[in-house]
Image (cartoon, grey):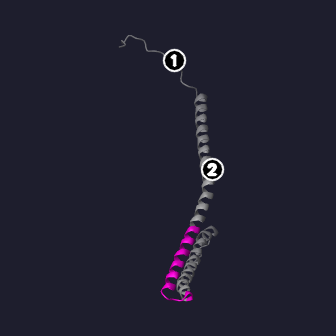
Amino acid sequence: MASHSDPIPAATDPAPSLPKLAQGWVAAAGATVKSTTELAFAEARLAAVSVPAMLMAAVLSAACLLLGWVLLVSALAYSLVGLGITPAKAFLLIGAPHFLAAILLWRLVERLSRNLDFAHTRQHLAGSDEKTD
């Protein structure tokens, strides 16, 4: 234990000067910017590789789905012909609901496409007080 009569040791490191503190802060900020930039570029490269892979997988998935649907419809038509229905009637029985579904889906797409108009945003940017549908 140190006695009360021991002198207080002198500080060996003087307090850092303001320019040294500023230099350290700038170096730390630069390192943060550098590491953040490197991370952003790494993620951008990953995204650049992922997008074509996603597109390829989506196209292959759509092709597999289409092929599966064609096989199911063919099996249904074959079964109907096996029940004694003529091939023409079997194809009409299968084709009519598909045609109706295509029309209904197309109308849905047309209705949803109106949401891409940005009418209220254009109205707000123009400063107009008129109501748009």
Tell me the residue that label 1 is attached to. Answer: 12
Main SS of the magenta segment?
Answer: helix
Magenta span contains residue 124: no
* SS at circle 1: loop
Which residue shows up at 58% across the image and 64% down it? 58
- Badge nearest the viewer, 1 or 2: 2
Quarter the C terminus occupies? bottom right
Which residue shows up at 64% across the image and 69% down it? 126
Specify few, some or many for label 2: CA neighbours under 10 Å numbering under 14, 14-19, or 20 or more. few
**Residues under labels 1 and 2: Cα distance?**
50 Å
Instruction: Write down the quadrant of residue 52 in the picture.
Output: bottom right
Query: In the rendered image of this protein, does residue 39 appear above or below residue 77?
Result: above
Q: Amino acid at mark 2?
A: Arg
* SS at circle 2: helix
Quarter the N terminus occupies? top left
Residue 82 x/y as whole percent: 49, 84
Magenta stretch bounds: 62-88
Q: Earlier in the sequence, mark 1 or mark 2?
A: 1
Residue 120 x/y as whole percent: 58, 71
Instruction: Write down the quadrant of residue 56 in the picture.
Output: bottom right
- In the image, which disc is placed on residue 41? none
Tell me the residue that label 2 is attached to. Answer: 45
Residue situated in front as seen by the camera: 3 or 94: 94
Q: Amino acid at mark 1?
A: Thr
Query: In the rendered image of this protein, does residue 49 appear above or below residue 3?
Result: below
Residue situated in front as seen by the camera: 106 or 33: 106
Residue situated in front as seen by the camera: 90 or 3: 90
Magenta span contains residue 76: yes
Which residue shows up at 59% across the image and 74% down it? 113
Residue 2 x/y as whole percent: 37, 13
